[in-house]
Amino acid sequence: MRSTHDDLARFLTPHAARHGLSRRTLLKAGVATTALIATTGVMSDRSAAKSGTPSPVPANPAFGGLHVYSVDPAMEPSAITNFHGQVGAAVVDGSGIWKVDGKAPETLLFDTDMRFMQGTFRGTDGRDHTGTFAFV
């Protein structure tokens, strides 16, 4: 069997470069899948009742009606009512550069609120449950 230049190039090219799936595409697909599952109710009421659905804290008008309050020791750090456990919260601000071919780079600002909660909570079924939650 005789090898051609194309055979050698195909062998030496890294696997990731041989197909069109980049990390960014994979992450976008993961986010889209998660959003689809979260919004379409793929998880049935029966599975939610088994795991214990938490009740959110009251809506906060300052955050557009979301069930989240500021990251402040005087505020409620959890997004779950009747929660007892650990909460980690951070506000991350910054800027980034957006580049589009043929156009001038543009500076974009971002402001994120991230939290995790781990502990016990009283579910909508009236029983105590243990869980870990994240809010990004």
Image (cartoon, rainbow, N blue to C red):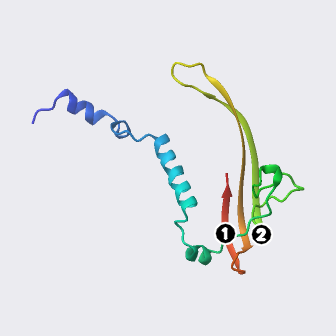
Q: Which of 66 and 100 is in front in this view?
A: 66
User: Pointer 2: residues within 10 angstroms few (<14), some, or many (20+)?
Assistant: many
Report if the CB atoms under discs 2 and 1 are less than 8 Å apart. Answer: no
SS state under label 2? strand
Residue occupying the far left of the picture? 1
Q: In this view, does 72 lie above or below 21?
A: below
How far across and how far down the image is residue 88, in percent?
A: 75, 56
SS state under label 1? strand
Q: Which of 41 and 2 is in front in this view?
A: 41
- Residue in the image at 79% along x and 71% along y: 82
User: Pointer 1: residues within 10 angstroms few (<14), some, or many (20+)?
Assistant: few
Quadrant in which residue 129 is drawn:
bottom right
- Residue in the image at 59% along x and 19% along y: 104
Query: Mark on residue 14?
Result: none
Tell me the amino acid under the disc marked 2. Phe
Sooner in the amino-acid sequence: mark 2 or mark 1: 2
Quadrant in which residue 66 is drawn:
bottom right
In this image, 107 relative to 68: left or right? left
Q: In this view, does 18 lie above or below 5?
A: below
Quarter of the picture holding the N terminus: top left
Tell me the amino acid under the disc marked 1. Gly
How far across and how far down the image is residue 54, in percent?
A: 70, 70
Query: Mark on residue 83?
Result: 2
How far across and how far down the image is residue 100, in percent?
A: 54, 25
Q: Is residue 49 above or below residue 64?
A: below
Quadrant in which residue 130 is drawn:
bottom right
Residue named by callout 1 = 131
Q: Distance from label 2 to label 1 (Cα)?
A: 10 Å
Q: Nearer the viewer, residue 113 or 87?
A: 113
How far across and how far down the image is residue 83, in percent?
A: 77, 69
